[in-house]
Image (cartoon, grey):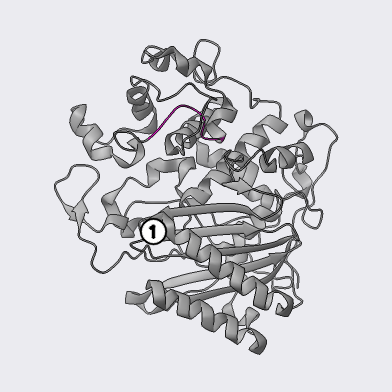
Amino acid sequence: MRLILPIFICSVAAACYSGPSEDTLPSTIELNNVLTNEMSDSSILKPMEKKIRNYMSLWRLQGAQLVIMRNDSLMYAKGFGWANKEENEEMRPGNIMRVASVSKLVTATGIMVLQDQGRLHLRDTVFGPRGILRDTLYCNSIKDKNYYKITVEDLLRHKGGFTTRGGDPLFSTASIMKNNHLSIAPDNKQLLRLILRRRLSFVPGTSQYYSNVGYMILSLVIEEVTGEPYENFIRREVLEKAGCRDFHIAGNYYKDRHRGEVRYYVPSNEPLVPEFNNSGDSVVRCYGGNNITALQGAGAWVASAPELALLVASIDGKEEIPDIISKESVKEMTRYIDKETYSLGWNDTDPDNAWVRTGTLSGTNAMIKYYPDGECWIFLSNTSTWKGPSLAKYTSALIAELRRSFSEKLPAQDLFHDTPQKEIQ
């Protein structure tokens, strides 16, 4: 039996693009329930898998997933090492894990869906009397009128004027609570009001600086425009329409893990850290050191590598799996300006190299590389290293090496379709 992917209705104008009609939504098949490691077993790929295990051993990664997609066909999907070593649970392709800043690609897609629906535009201002977030509680907090210049596109491209001088507010919860005499961690609306009291570091649109704050604000923009929680809108209008059934917003602690979620690991010599909420307790950084849930669209999604591939296939402009956004929006998200300018949701979309999206958190490393020939490699790990975000360049080199040596040896199969059906329970 075959996994039936969604059929979509295409329109000419991006402004009225409506995505799939109600009677052509994805079936209730959950990809993560049907994929197994054995489906990608191949004797000719054993040397590739040995290189992956060697890489994991070098960086002491407890577990990892690798998927390879070509022209929207999932040709390879496999887990390596441990999903949860303490529970003797081996990594499967369907295990889910935090994907860190890969979440920004999800959020950017949600913004493009809203633009396709005519509910906002990238040029819309975010703050001020005519902005999207024009609530008086926000306006009354603003002292620097440059905030009124911030557009939706500025936030997508990390040009909003925010920097991490003095710390990243999304990773400084304890000090923010202490400085503002708060007994509980602020929610994102309260945190934004506190942020708006500060001066911007540069005039919006004139420079760029990688900003988690910008994408947290985009999460609030989505909530304001839609009138519903960020997660609900993204799940219904982005993920489900792409056929992704097993994305979730992360919890902060091991006890909050979702069904099929891995255990996260940090370097064995990393010391305990204070809990983010000023409880006075010391915790492993990946479980309570930061308020991961509050990252929302900046870095809070949990997913599997195969479902990430399915999402990418739904926004890549290829016809094999119809896109959930208009052709104009695909072009806008992947438009390459120069090496100094971030793309929308992607880190980079250099047409001569690859579209790249990376993510790093304590206990997590993630990378998507989508090449001009239509081949996409996704690597996820449930372990962080002392290299932090710098590990990405080594993972990129690994993918490049594996692609050179094994791309032509990939099995002629499409695991998006050639898998048994299994209904969601």
Residue type at mark 1 is Arg
Q: Is 239 positioned to the left or the right of 101 in the image? A: right
Q: Quadrant of residue 353?
A: bottom right
**Up-down relation of residue 140 to residue 118 (above or below):** above
Does residue 134 show up? no
Q: Quadrant of residue 333?
A: top right
Write the residue at 41% across / 78% down. Answer: 57
Q: Quadrant of the C terminus?
A: bottom right
**Up-down relation of residue 183 to residue 324 (above or below):** above
Q: Is residue 159 magenta?
A: yes
The one of 33 and 425 positioned closer to us in this rendering: 33
Q: Is residue 155 magenta?
A: no
Write the residue at 40% across / 23% down. Answer: 200
Q: Position of residue 105 (x, y in %)?
A: 57, 46
The one of 5 and 106 positioned closer to us in this rendering: 106
Q: Position of residue 308 (x, y in %)?
A: 59, 57
Q: Main secondary structure of the magenta part?
A: loop
Write the residue at 72% across / 32% down. Answer: 116
Does residue 164 show up? yes
What residue is pinned by disc 1? 257
Write the residue at 56% across / 41% down. Answer: 107
Q: Residues within 10 Å of mark 1 (few under 14, many from 20)?
A: some
Q: Secondary structure at mark 1?
A: loop
**Up-down relation of residue 79 to residue 338 (above or below):** below
Q: Is 108 positioned to the left or the right of 89 in the image? A: right
Which residues are drawn in magenta?
157-163
The one of 268 and 299 positioned closer to us in this rendering: 268
The one of 389 and 225 positioned closer to us in this rendering: 389
